[in-house]
Structure formats: structure tokens, C-alpha cells
Image (cartoon, rainbow, N blue to C red):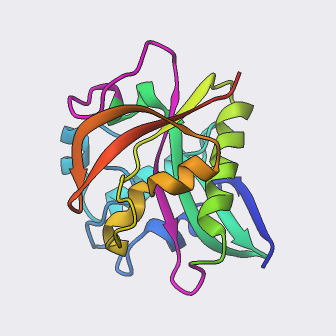
């Protein structure tokens, strides 16, 4: 499998990865950390998809997609931390005042897992952030050690995958996901 990672500017492909089977469903659409809580609660059903479609048309799309040929097989949400809920988080600390980017969601479609897609997504998100002038990129993965992680809650990523990509531990957090603590991992892009 040869994986190519590209900016998430094709809405239909983003919908394949993070959209619901039914347009009326109120799934995350990877908006929970991207937009203020009040707006996240107000956007219902098709309005969530419309919001994401608008993001896909922006100069800086909402993340990156992994492709196997023409088939979208993975998604990673990445944006300036200042544009996310992480800018205001009380559980995930700021390491310093550097205008870092955040990488907070990685999703690989069933049937394509355990084939290196998440590693390609992390690398693609790093390049995307670098190409847009980010001085550093952070992720907030689970620090699960060797414990198995529920795939539904593994969207934040796993610490060891970020370590393999060159990220280093920058801070502990008070955030816990699926029973595992989350940590701040950072990669300097300068």
C-alpha cells in the first residue's frame, strides 16, 4: 500500500472519514475541539456537515487526508492551537507562548488499520503545519504504555506513535481519555 497525504480540501473525502452515515446524525465531524463549545452544541444534523464543507474551502483546510490511490483511508485534524479549544483548555497546559499548531485527531478507516496509515498521517500533518509556517506542532495522545486502547477512543493517538515520529514529551496533563492519561508531545519545526 502506498499512502499519499494531502490537505483536506475535498469535502466528500472528509465526509467519508468523519461524517455520519445519516446526514441527520449529530456526530462529532471532528468539530469538538475546533470550535467553541457553545457553537459545537448549537450545530445539529446537516449544519455540522455544512460547517465542515465551508472549512474545506478555506485557504487552510481543516486537516489532512491519507489516500490509498484515490480512496480516502485516513484523517488527521491539525490547526493553529490558537484556533482550537486547546487555546483555552484547563486540562492541557500551554508549554510556552510559542504559536504552535495542534494535531488532535487521527482516524483510519476499518480495513486499512495496521498498515502504516496513522504514521503517514502524523508525518503529513507535520508537513502541513510546517508548510503553513508553524514553529512547532503539538499532539495530546494517550500515554497507554503497552495497554490496549479502545479504538473508539484512540482518536487522540498513542504516545509511542508520536515518539516514532520525532515528537518529545513536553508536559503532563490532567486530561484522561478512555482511562489513560494524555500527555503533551511536541516537535520543533524550526
In depth, the one of 143 and 53 nearer the eye is: 143
Q: Is residue 98 magenta?
A: yes
In this rendering, the count of numbered labels is 0
Question: Which residue shows up at 21% across the image and 40% down it?
Answer: 37
Quarter where residue 157 is shown: bottom left
Q: Position of residue 126 (x, y in %)?
A: 66, 42
Above-or-below relation of 99 to 76? above
Q: Main secondary structure of the magenta part?
A: loop
Left or right? Give the position of 159 relative to 48.
Answer: right
In depth, the one of 10 and 63 nearer the eye is: 63
Question: Which residue shows up at 34% across the image and 69% down it?
Answer: 147
In depth, the one of 188 and 46 nearer the eye is: 188
- Is residue 10 visible to us here? no
Quarter where residue 8 is shown: bottom right
Quarter of the figure with the C terminus: top right
Q: Position of residue 2 (x, y in %)?
A: 81, 73
Q: Is residue 173 magenta?
A: no
Q: Position of residue 106 (x, y in %)?
A: 49, 59
Q: Position of residue 32 (x, y in %)?
A: 30, 49
* Residue farthest to the front, as pictured: 146
Read off the magenta span.
Answer: 87-113
Amino acid at each position: 500500500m502506498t499512502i499519499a497525504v494531502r490537505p483536506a480540501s475535498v469535502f466528500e473525502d472528509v465526509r467519508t472519514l468523519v461524517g455520519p452515515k445519516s446526514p441527520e446524525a449529530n456526530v462529532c465531524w471532528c468539530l469538538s475541539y475546533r470550535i467553541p463549545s457553545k457553537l459545537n452544541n448549537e450545530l445539529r444534523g446537516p449544519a455540522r456537515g455544512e460547517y465542515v464543507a465551508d472549512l474545506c474551502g478555506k485557504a487552510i483546510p481543516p486537516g489532512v487526508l491519507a489516500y490509498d490511490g484515490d480512496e480516502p483511508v485516513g484523517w488527521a485534524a491539525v490547526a493553529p492551537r490558537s484556533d482550537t479549544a486547546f487555546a483555552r483548555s484547563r486540562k492541557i497546559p500551554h508549554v510556552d507562548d510559542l504559536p504552535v499548531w495542534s494535531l488532535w485527531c487521527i482516524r483510519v478507516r476499518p480495513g486499512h488499520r495496521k498498515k502504516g496509515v496513522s504514521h503517514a498521517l502524523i508525518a503529513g500533518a507535520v508537513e502541513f503545519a510546517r508548510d503553513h509556517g508553524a514553529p512547532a506542532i503539538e499532539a495530546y495522545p494517550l500515554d497507554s504504555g503497552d495497554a490496549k486502547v479502545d479504538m473508539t477512543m484512540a482518536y487522540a493517538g498513542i504516545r509511542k506513535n508520536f515518539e516514532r515520529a520525532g515528537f518529545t514529551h513536553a508536559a503532563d496533563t490532567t486530561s484522561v481519555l478512555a482511562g489513560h492519561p494524555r500527555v503533551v508531545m511536541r516537535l520543533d519545526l524550526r
